[in-house]
Image (cartoon, coloured by chain):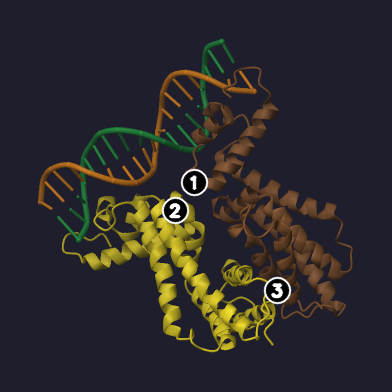
Chain colours: A brown, B yellow, C green, D orange
Amino acid sequence: MARKTGSSGIETARGIRDAALKLFADKGFAAVSMREIAREVGVQVGALYLYTPDKQSLLADLMIAHLEDLLAAWQREGAGDLPPSQAFDAFVGFHISYHLTRVDEVFIAYMELRSLSPENFAKVERLRRLYENVLQDILIAGEAEGIFRLKDARVTTLALIAMLTGVNTWYRAGGRLSPERIEEIYRALARDMVGAP
Amino acid sequence: MARKTGSSGIETARGIRDAALKLFADKGFAAVSMREIAREVGVQVGALYLYTPDKQSLLADLMIAHLEDLLAAWQREGAGDLPPSQAFDAFVGFHISYHLTRVDEVFIAYMELRSLSPENFAKVERLRRLYENVLQDILIAGEAEGIFRLKDARVTTLALIAMLTGVNTWYRAGGRLSPERIEEIYRALARDMVGAP
DNA sequence: GTCTATAGAGCGATAGAC
DNA sequence: GTCTATCGCTCTATAGAC
């Protein structure tokens, strides 16, 4: 690394994003210094401030981009208009495979909420709520059609998401179970929880 | 506060523990300074080092004490020798009510693993594994008796614990649901997941 | 048992040269 | 677009007085 003048700003911007993501996930936002991020990128610390007004915005941008990508990816899946039973299966599979391929983003989005300013916290919470409602709407539609039996739609939604996201705490590539097998097990557990036949 | 000579060391030790617990849970380990803890306790920063060799041990002691208390509380419950179906219900109720009354401890024990030294991390992981195995043994015993139908004992254990612990992220005292009602809903969800009749 | 004072280091952010 | 230099501040941990 160690570029001088003439470097591409876009490249540096991406490098900063990647370095911040990795370091924040590894050590936590408060434990990472701007100097450390700069070293990882291969620039001096002053250069970081061409790309972010401050350290906290760097974190907020990562979290907001992650949640927006998550919502956009679900839209692209195009499963929102399927019958509830199929939409439910699609959601479970989507959630697990998306989360298993974005481990650092997911980790940060759950762990660093308290490091955000109130404004950024509100933005992140709004996006998270939108995502929760994707699942909740599927559950309610399925209940209305009589194919799901729910105790409480909101609690079941949160219970499902907590269960599914929990995979990230123990999954390691090359472990006993393949991602496909894991998806299969969690899909069965999830269907049991909503009383799907 | 602001004691001088003649104070009780036991009182101060407890004050430090409580202050560290609260501040670490609120702001995260790395974001809390020893000065801040001292201020909360009502002593000068130098006094803290009479009670802990360093900041990191303060954290490790909190986490290890929490997990040891959790295991001891389950032992006191005396449900380990019940038939699997009853032991399972007892575990679910125990887990939720214990976790809902120790919000800060639980939060720290999940969030600050990366702030531990390798030795302390290993201790904490060992205790956590012991606790997971309490549930896993119940599941396996129930499957052997033919009252549970499991896809995978280990995955189901981790899925259950993630689901149950997830309550801590949304429960607020005085909310829509009482702790008793929440326990009831989660018990039903949990029984569905293991195929209990 | 607690205080004051301090060492030695690192922090976020900015100014100005190139 | 990046660098160097620096301001003003905070940090953990320790030494020595009381």
User: Of the residues tagged 1 and 3, which is closer to the observer?
Assistant: 3
Q: Looking at numbered disc 3 in the image, what kind of residue is underneath it?
A: Thr
* Chain label for disc 1: A
**Position of D5 compared to B167: left or right?**
left
Image quadrant where one finds the C terminus of chain A: bottom right
SS category of the residue bearing label 1: helix
Callout 2 touching callout 1 (CB < 8 Å)? yes
Is residue B73 positioned above or below D2 on the image? below
SS category of the residue bearing label 3: helix
Residue at the location (69% across, 88% down)? B197
Q: To which residue does mark 1 refer? A: A30
The count of marks equals 3
* Chain label for disc 2: B
Q: What is the quadrant of residue A194 in the picture?
A: bottom right
* Chain label for disc 3: A
Callout 1 touching callout 3 (CB < 8 Å)? no
Q: What is the quadrant of residue B75 in the picture?
A: bottom left
Residue at the location (41% across, 83% down)? B76
**Position of B94 compared to B183: left or right?**
left
Residue B29's disc is 2
Residue placed most toward the observer, A46 or B145: B145
Mark 1 closeness class: few <14, some 14–19, many ≥20 residues within 10 Å? some
Q: What is the quadrant of residue A3 in the picture?
A: top right
Indicate the position of residue C5 as horizontal and vertical percent values.
21, 40
Q: Looking at numbered disc 1 in the image, what kind of residue is underneath it?
A: Ala
Distance from disc 1 to disc 3, alpha carbons, whole Å, reads: 34 Å
Does residue B143 appear in the picture of this structure? yes
